Amino acid sequence: TYVLRYRGVKTNEASERLDGTVKDVNGNPIEGVRVDVAWPMPDGTTKIMPFWTDGNGVGHIYGVVGSNPYMQHNTVVLTVTTNLKTISRSTWWYRTRRLADGSAGFKTTVNDSTVHAGQIVTATSLARTSTGAPIVGLLVTFTWTLGSTTVKTTAYTDSTGRARSTYTVLSSTSRSTLYVKGSTTAYSINRSSTASFHRTD
C-alpha cells in the first residue's frame, strides 16, 4: 500500500512525502524490504529513490515538486521484490492552485435536505480560488455516511469547479440524520466540507 501526504501540491514543494507499506499474503508487515520509488523530477527525468521497511513494514521518501503545468498528473511507481517476485504499484500527484479560505474555496451541498425513499440525492462540491475562479480537474472524494453504512465515490471538478456524486435513497436507508462529506487536496492543504439530509417519509 502507499499514501501520498498530499495529492494536490503547491509549486516547487521541496518535501512531498510518500509512505509505503509492505505486507505478506497474510497481511503481516515485512521488515527490511527495499522499495524503489520512481519519482518524476522537475526537469522531466525520473529519479529512483529507495527506502527500506521498518519493523512495521513501513518506509517513506521525500520527493521534489517543480513547476510543471497545473493539474497535470505525475505518476509515481513503487517497485518491491520479495521471494523472487516483483510487484509494482503506482499513484500520482498534481500541481494545483490554492483554494480560497473557508467555504468560499471549498463547499459541499445537497440538492435537497428532506428526502424520501426512491429519491436521488445529488451532492456537489465547489472548488474556487480566492478570486472566485473555478479549479478544474480537481479530484474530490465523497463519503456518504448513511447510518451504519458508508459509501465512497470520486469525481473531478468540471469547467465550473463543481464535482458531483449521487445516492438513491432506499426503503432501508436510515431515518437518522445522513451526511455526505466532500474531501480534496489542493496546494498541499487537505480540505473537506460536509452537508446533511434526512428522510421525511
Image (cartoon, rainbow, N blue to C red):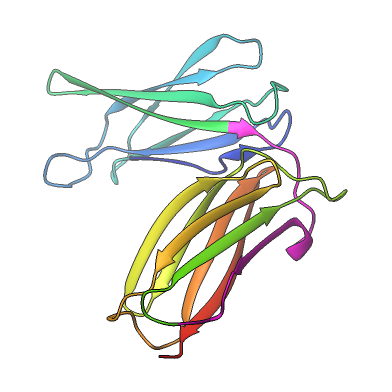
Q: Which residues are magenta?
A: 94-115
* Image side of residue 43 versus residue 167, left or right: right
In magenta segment, residue 188: no
Write the residue at 81% across / 45% down. Answer: 133
* Image side of residue 73 versus residue 11, left or right: left
Residue at the farthest bottom position: 201
Write the residue at 62% across / 38% down. Answer: 137
Q: Could you tell me residue 161's position as x and y percent?
A: 69, 47
Q: Could you tell me residue 152's position as x and y percent?
A: 40, 58
Task: Tell me if residue 38 comes above or below residue 59 in the rendering.
Answer: above
* Image side of residue 69 versus residue 111, left or right: right
Q: Quadrant of residue 33?
A: top left
Q: Quadrant of residue 182?
A: bottom right
Q: Nearer the viewer, residue 31 or 44?
A: 44
Residue at the farthest front position: 118
Which quadrant, please, contains the N terminus?
top left
Q: Could you tell me residue 186's position as x and y percent?
A: 66, 45
